[in-house]
Image (spheres, rainbow, N blue to C red):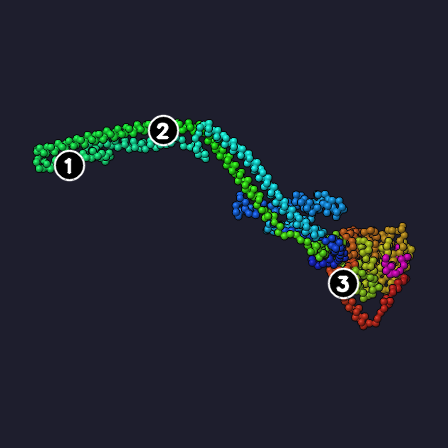
Amino acid sequence: MDPIPVPPPQESKLHFLDYWRIIRIRKTVILAVFLLVVITATVVTFILPPKYKSMARIKIERDQTDIPSLTQQQGSFSPYDPYFMQTEFELMKSEVVLDKVIKNLNLNEEWGKLEGGAPLKKQQTIDKLKRMMDPRQVRNTSLVEIWVTSFNKEEAAKLANEIAEAYQAHRLEERAELTTGGIKSLEERWKEQEASVGKAQSNVDYLRDKLKISDPNSGAEMPGPLLTTESLHRIEGLRIESSAELVKMETLLSKLEELQRTNPAALIQTIPITAPDSYLNSLMEQVTVADQRLVMVQKDYGPENDETKKARESVSDLKQKIKDRVDGIMLGLQAKVASVRESLDQMKKEVDEATKTDISKASESAPYWKAKRELEEQEHFRAILDLKIISEKVDLSLPKTTMVEIVDRAVAPLFASSPNKTLNIALGVIVGLVVGIGLAFFIEYLDTSVKTIDDVERSLQSPVLGVIPQNVGLLVDEGVESPHAEAYRVLRTNLLFSRKDEKLNTVAVVSAGAGEGKSTTVFNLACVFAQGSQRVLIVDSDLRRPTLHRMLRVSNSIGLTNYLLKQNTLEEVIQTTNLPSMDFLASGKLPSSSLGILSSSQMRDLINELKQRYDFVFFDSPPIMGVSDASILASEVDMTLQVIQYRRYPQPMNIRAKQLIEKVGGNLIGIVLNNINMSQDESYYYYSGYYHDYYSRNEDQEKGSGPDEGPGDKTKLDIKPKY
């Protein structure tokens, strides 16, 4: 028969049921930690003295007056400063503010009495007060809440109010001190400026007298208009007018002279227009009348008549007078042009002389005007200082209640703020559960022992042939119908199918360490085989700590060692049991000089002999990690079963035990998981839970229908030598 195949190792993935399994298994740890934390939290909560919190609310603004000052514009506001509030929080906790609170409430002496009688030092009181207070800003507002915690409710309210008042007083005093100091500094600077103005005024007066400067306009910054300057302006105006007139007259004269040379008749016609003259106009009218009379006379008397001649002579005489008058007008124009030209030359000389005089006067009076400008600058700065001093004095007198305004005063609280019993106990419950579960998972993480079948098959690469539940007794005591017997029947079935050859009938049961239940496994497995009508022998080969004889309640005075030492025959050392098909070979007494007796040829001969006599021979062995006997047995028998107790030894220890079996050439056919707690680990339920339920129902039915049996009716084992 082929051995049961081992499934390939699968990737380890945690499921919710795995977490639940850990919680159920470690429920004792979780419950212990949970109760410890909850009880501790509850006791501490009820032991702690109550603390009270009281709050005073204030409104904080930057330094300003209740109404706009002289220099402040109506409706102006300061830009948002993110550091202002934080700065004020630190100011509230500063020594300058808290020192006022300490002095006003006499805290050094009051708290000193509570702590022993001697007054506290100021720094100690300040540190304690800082720990008690907690300023907080109301979000998106300029309101600040000053919280104070104390064991006395009245003291908490009193401290909160006093801190608010001390801070308010400090802000007002600080503003007043700064303003007063600024005014004093400005007044000192004003006195210095007044001295500078007086000195500058003296210098101006001295220069005015020295330079003989006429300055009727005391507010002028430049020299006033002197007499020469007025004359200069007047002459310059006349010169400009005369110059324009001269150009006009010279142009007219030039045109008239040109007409005089080229066209005298046109000149006569032009003169009355350009240079009107009444006499010339009269002459020209007379010529016109004379010409008309001449024409009439010539018409009436003829050209040679005396009247005609007289009329002709009168016209000629008038024309000569007109010519002479035009020549006179031309001479008058020439004379007038010459006169204007001479007048312009004279005015130019006067302008040059006046300019020289002005330059000389300006150079002489420059120091005076410079000193005068300096005087005006000094007076202007003095006026600025006057205005600043007046505005600051007015600002100092204005009310400033809006800088720090106490909105809500603190009152004694009705209930204690801490300890919050409900919250603390609830947190204790939550923390206890979290810590307990966390500790359980941490312990589970540190626990490297075998927990599941997957752990065995993944680490040892060997099939699990049987899963034995917890608290399994001896099947000979529990009876054939014991629910635990089914787990061993499953083990028997898997063992039979794991044999490669039906001739393999000797089995050694080993374990890595002591106390893993291999002796019980050997005994119950042999009982199951015996109940199947197979001839079975149990050999107690654990020569150092034999236990099988106690299970069978027989003496260990004779057994395997006696046969190997050739003190008794095989028939003498084999004993029978209450099961007809199961025999027992005890270990016997082991002399200290015969510790390696299992490795002798007699042991190999014994195994061969027993193979012939019995269908199956089961060998109990000592722990393989501590004694070499188990390794020797594993190398001599046909098959080896390794018993691993659930959650007892680390996996590396079990892996090492398997390696020792394989190293000596043993045939490890599978693993037996022992002492499984079915009630805590549901992953094993399907191996044996069904049988528990089945047999429980079966027993209930039998009790209801069969005769009553008392507890003292157990069948006692009757063990006696076979031969």
- Locate residue 717: give its quadrant: bottom right
- In the rendered image, is residue 65 in sight? yes
Q: Position of residue 232 (x, y in %)?
A: 37, 30
The amino acid type, in three-letter code, at marker 2 is Val
Question: In 3D space, how far apart are the residues under numbered discs 2 and 3 (Cα atoms)?
Answer: 141 Å
The residue carrying pointer 2 sits among few (fewer than 14), some (14 to 19) or many (20 or more) residues within 10 Å by Cα, namely many
Q: Which mark is residue 351?
A: 2
- Locate residue 39: give its quadrant: bottom right
2 and 1 marks in contact (CB < 8 Å): no
Q: Which mark is residue 688?
A: 3
Residue 435 in the image: above or below residue 700? above
Q: Position of residue 511 (x, y in %)?
A: 80, 55
Is 554 a magenta residue? yes
At horizontal 69% and vertical 45% (from top left) the residue drawn is 103
Question: In 3D space, how far apart are the residues under numbered discs 2 and 1 (Cα atoms)?
Answer: 54 Å
Q: Secondary structure at mark 1?
A: helix
